Amino acid sequence: MAEPSTRPTLARIAEEAGVSLATISKVLNGRADVAPGTRHRVEELLATHQYRRRGAGGAHAPLIELVFHELHSGWSMEVIRGVQQAADENGLAVVLTRSGTRHAPGAEWIGGVIARRPECVVLVFSEIPAAMRETLAARGIPFAVVDPAGDPAPDVPAVGSANWAGGLAAVRHLIELRHRRIAVISGPTDMMCSHARVDGYRAAMTAAGLPIRNEWIRYGDFHTTGGAEGARRLLALDEPPTAIFAGSDLQALGVYEVARERGLRIPEDLSVVGYDDLPFAEWLSPRLTTVHQPLEAMGRAAALLAIRIARGEIHDTPRLDLATSLVARESTAPIGARAGEAG
Amino acid sequence: MAEPSTRPTLARIAEEAGVSLATISKVLNGRADVAPGTRHRVEELLATHQYRRRGAGGAHAPLIELVFHELHSGWSMEVIRGVQQAADENGLAVVLTRSGTRHAPGAEWIGGVIARRPECVVLVFSEIPAAMRETLAARGIPFAVVDPAGDPAPDVPAVGSANWAGGLAAVRHLIELRHRRIAVISGPTDMMCSHARVDGYRAAMTAAGLPIRNEWIRYGDFHTTGGAEGARRLLALDEPPTAIFAGSDLQALGVYEVARERGLRIPEDLSVVGYDDLPFAEWLSPRLTTVHQPLEAMGRAAALLAIRIARGEIHDTPRLDLATSLVARESTAPIGARAGEAG
């Protein structure tokens, strides 16, 4: 590998790859008319030599690219609004793309982003494959991550939120309402935020001297189905919980559904706490007590981070965790409360 | 004004404007370094001479621009998803911008879109100012409109939905459930779709031989507040309605809120029909009976329309109204029904 002081020129890379400079230029600009094998060889050499386009910024379009794997109704729109706001403030337009899985963008995305040459990229993913990062770096396109899963690579500029503290706050609230049999339905086990929220649950229970049973801890999918499935199992226990921390607002909806099926009233018979605080949380009946995850602010902060890196104002890889906070509404009540006493 | 056969060259426009060809080119490409007065003079001449860039398409970026005045949570995301789908199918990326008022995009938007040079534009607005249309036409950037308000200019390619039929279906459903005192809370009076939905209401009532009272027809704002305000007035009448067609899902939420305040049960004491069928409609308790407005399909159809115009496959200005349909859930029941009989 070359020393930084002997930074290879494109000519040298062209020679090593056995192709013309024009071909190297095509690969750098994301043009389609290059054979896949050639493209691959050139990309590898660009990465090996840690090639970086000089004077990044000048040649870029005034765009910021925002990449999701899925466009959820509530969740994604909060992040989009935040990115849009940062873009407006900085004279950029937002390109919205959808690619890949929950964990990382798909390979097909990278060709598009190189051709579009945005000033910078905001990714709503936890993992950015090394090859993808190299490809972006070679074009001088910096990125920052909005990290929903709570586990970004250590050298990635990322904005997350305080998942452990959110779990703690949710369960402390239930303990203050004198609940003792408290269950949790967290997210998928392959997302660190699921574990962080369960650890917050454990910390609150332990600090209050309350027992924790294994069957009270469940993992879902962050969607309605996972919440309903978890609630069905929990409410079928010999000693069912009197309160459920549902891990997400959508899972809380699933819990509402199962409670309704079983004729349980919320909050009189069962207290429920969500997570996220999406707009619909306050439209539900009863209005959902939940942990506010500042998704709009996270989107804005990640976009500002990427823009400042692109403009050379930041040179390290900052990490931010924005605060979460409990929003008490109507779905939680003191244990044994009846209608009229609740709230 | 020049005849189409004597189409003026840019040289002639430059001469008339008293500027260089380079300046004309800067204006055409949306560059910032042109004095506002000069820009204005050149735009006017381009419009007067009906200048059209030749070979439109080649010089464009593979982008489709989607413009909203506001990023609502549910509503906008449905449209975005549809546009994104059409863009994916056609190798385009989506630029998402926010501008203007409910009626028309703001003037600041036009400079940005010219500089970005997208292949085409989808506007979620009813009115496109003539100067803006000329500016886009001169650059060979076609557009289509997703028309939420139901009143696009006759020469604008637009995709709407069947508002009158939607109002009719909502009220027919209530009449079939033997309601006779049926009220409507429609949208703002300056949107044609509000009137179309009320006319559908009138048609259903008249066809069934039911009386219509003026105080049963109210106009709101399509938001929760408008629904709550309307419901408060309607339920305070000496003979309050037994069913309310709420005009939008958000207004239906407002009706739910007021019903809860007054201890009225839905649907036992009051039937409610929404409009839009946003994702949250089926999460409400009770699940909302509503008119499905195919927002995702409308976004997709408008994007495909704009793309086909951009690619020279369509030369007229097509208009589409996609069908609406009633989705019966739990918020409506036969008049006088009690829990257990409902549904």
Image (tube, coloured by chain):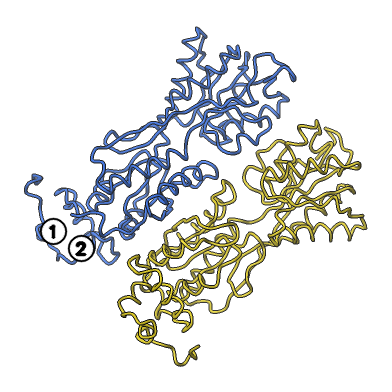
Chain colours: A blue, B yellow
The residue located at (68%, 46%) in the rendering is: B249
Q: Which amino acid does label 1 sit on?
A: Leu
Observer able to see residue A156: yes
Instruction: Name the residue at the front extreme.
Output: B37
Q: How far apart are marks 2 and 1 (CA)?
A: 9 Å
Quadrant in which the C terminus of chain A is drawn: top right
Residue A212: x and y, percent? 51, 12
The residue singled out by tag 2 in the image is A25
Observer able to see residue B89: no
Q: In this view, does B182 lie above or below A196?
A: below
Q: What residue type is labelled 2?
A: Ser
Mark sitting on residue A10:
1
The residue located at (53%, 31%) in the rendering is: A248
Marks 2 and 1, the one that precedes in the sequence: 1
The answer for which chain carries disc 1 is A
Mark 2, Cα crowd under 10 Å, few <14 / some 14-19 / many 20+, is: few
Residue A263: x and y, percent? 73, 25
